Amino acid sequence: MGLSRSASPRLGVHAVALACAALSLQCGTRSSAPAKASPSAPGGLDEQCSAGNARACSELGKQLRADAPERAEALFQRACDSGDAPGCGALGELRIAQEDYAAARALYDRACKGKHADACNDLGVLYAKGVGGPQDFERARSYYRRACDAGQFLGCANLGALVAKGIGGAADLSQAHALFEKACRGGSGLGCYNLAHQLANGIGVDKNVEQAVRLYAKACDAKTAEACGALGWMFEEGEAVPRDPSRARKLFERGCDGRHGDSCAELGQMLREGRGGDANEGRARELYARACELASGAGCTNLGTALASGMGGAADFAAARGAFQRACDAGDATGCYDLAQLLETDRGGAPDVDAARRLYQRACAQGEADACAKAQGGAPSK
């Protein structure tokens, strides 16, 4: 059973509040200033709302959301019914939390038509992910564009990610670069992260690794977890910066705290091997489990290896099979290979030689050299 490493930093789109997976864009970060009730209106927000001021109802709902959620919901509904776009947007956020995504789409649509930029971005996320209705990347682009044009810089970053990859329309790396620059200047950590990735790899622009390091740091400080992981990877490998395992470890910890699965996996590796600080196999196993929960293929593979070997806790071959399956499903070739090895035996369940052969073929197609010989019925290379 082999340990797996997460991939080097890649063009990323951020995780969403609504349990994102493969194409994860960011929503829910309020980047535009909230509209306020009229300061000239007499009385407090409660009195203004009772007098028919829809914006006051919306603002009062925001103040009461944590302590009186039912009243806040009623206030948002009242504001939205009276045509207040921020009220519709706030009600849409509540529907997201309630997992009523179809209702959230309808509310975000009303809010976006009312020129509420945050809602335009969030509606774009729902269309991009196919949540609450059909997936439609062209429409996602249009909503991100409306958000970006209105000064919602996360919308610029999300639009840039689709434009860079040619999703929902033609690819245009120059346009994507301009969008990432605009987003980064506006304070979007995701924009800075994707801009850093372009510069670090010379994608559509002249390569400038030194500038990329500065932008990764800026994005990390803005709580973009992927950026902390990317910067940690550079300090771990000594790429364009002095090799510094201790600093890398701290950066991976920040990334992991921000729910970046690959950062958790890399931090686990460092604790297992005692790089950049003390070794702790029990903690490493916990980090692999967290990484796997956050959809890191490398994390699931390493969790499976820990479970199969008894590293940091009791051995559990049945649980190892499950971890390797999740790794394989996430595209980690080592996970497919290790699952195939278990399926050739009765460890953790009944043998299944045919399934093992298919997994070896899959791992081989994904670049796992040892799997190629096994797929043909031979022994792995030494």
Image (cartoon, rainbow, N blue to C red):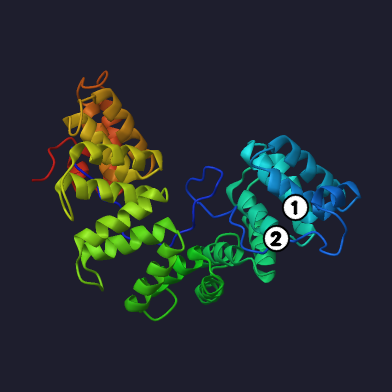
Q: CA distance from mark 2 to mark 1?
A: 9 Å
Between 70 and 249, the one lying in front of the other is 70
- Could you say whether the residue bearing mark 2 is in a helix, strand or loop? loop
Of the pair 32 and 352, the residue shown nearer to us: 32
Q: Residues within 10 Å of mark 1 (few under 14, many from 20)?
A: many
| Sooner in the amino-acid sequence: mark 2 or mark 1 | 2
Tell whether 16 sits left or right of 43.
Answer: left
Residue occupying the point 67% across, 43% down:
65
- Residue lying at 87% horizontally and 53% vertically, measured from the top left: 53
Tell me which amino acid carries mark 2.
Pro
Residue 81 place in picture, x, y as percent? 85, 46
Residue 184 numbered mark, or none: none
Between 23 and 43, the one lying in front of the other is 43
x%, y% of residue 379?
12, 38
What residue did someone put label 1 on?
Answer: 59
x 19%, y 23%: residue: 345
